[in-house]
Image (cartoon, rainbow, N blue to C red):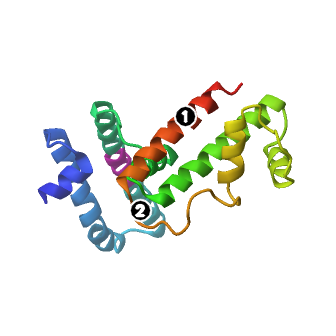
Amino acid sequence: MDDLVYMILGDMTAGNILVMGFAIVLFGATPAAMLLLFGTYSDGMRWLIGLGLVTAMGFVALYIMRMGLAKEAGDSKSRPAQTEYTGELTKLTEAFERAADGYVYSQQVIRERLCDVIISKEAQAREMGEEEITDMLEAGKTGILADAALDGFLRENRRGAKSGVESSVKGKSKERGERFMTDIDGIMDRIEAMT
């Protein structure tokens, strides 16, 4: 019973206990009282009594909800700042950690994401759509990017392109992960330098 009271009203105060007791009596005893009383009154009086009881129940329910909302608002103010997010950036961070450990699939995911960034930045710089840049790549047009290293990286690693990664490589390798991270650091520096 104490858990139920705490869940509905929060901290145990005299006012909360009084309201809870009133609510239990009102919601529990009302149907029995209505059955006993309605037998002695006329139809019009039954309607008035029923309307009064429903109104009283509504006010008690609103009070209980208001108390719960006030408690929840107070809890949110004292809650510490969120430090972990379960969105795209968390997934990307986890992919970088796995790639640094040498997992080939995570490395390819990162390569593809970087290719998306390169295409997006180049499209913005040229004031074109990303689809137009992709169409130029698929048509085999050379020299799309001013940076030859980024141009080659984009051709080898974007989605749908034949990857430079050996598909036969399985599992993980710490050395491969370290080499990958060194290469990716260089690519990321070049991407940052794009205008």
Which region shows up in magenta?
56-65
11 falls in the magenta region:
no
Residue 120 locus on image (x, y percent) = 72, 39
In this rendering, position of residue 87 left or right of residue 23: right
Name the residue beneath numbered marker 1.
186
Task: Check disc 1: other Cα within 10 Å, few if <14, some if 14-19, many if 20+.
Answer: few
- The residue under the point 70% across, 60% down is 160
- The residue under the point 48% across, 59% down is 104
- The residue under the point 52% across, 69% down is 168
In the rendered image, the vertical position of residue 124 relative to residue 25, given as above or below? above
In the rendered image, the vertical position of residue 36 relative to residue 108, given as above or below? below
Which residue is more in the foreground, 53 or 72?
A: 72
Residue 76 locus on image (x, y percent) = 33, 36
Residue 167 locus on image (x, y percent) = 56, 66
Q: Is residue 21 visible?
A: no
Label 2 element class: helix
Residue 25 locus on image (x, y percent) = 22, 59
Q: Magenta part mainly helix, strand or loop?
A: helix
Which image quarter is the N terminus in? bottom left
What kind of residue is marked 2?
Gly
Which residue is more in the foreground, 79 or 157?
A: 157
Name the residue beneath numbered marker 2.
50
Disc 2/disc 1 C-alpha distance (Å): 77 Å
Give the mark nearest the N terminus, 2 or 1.
2
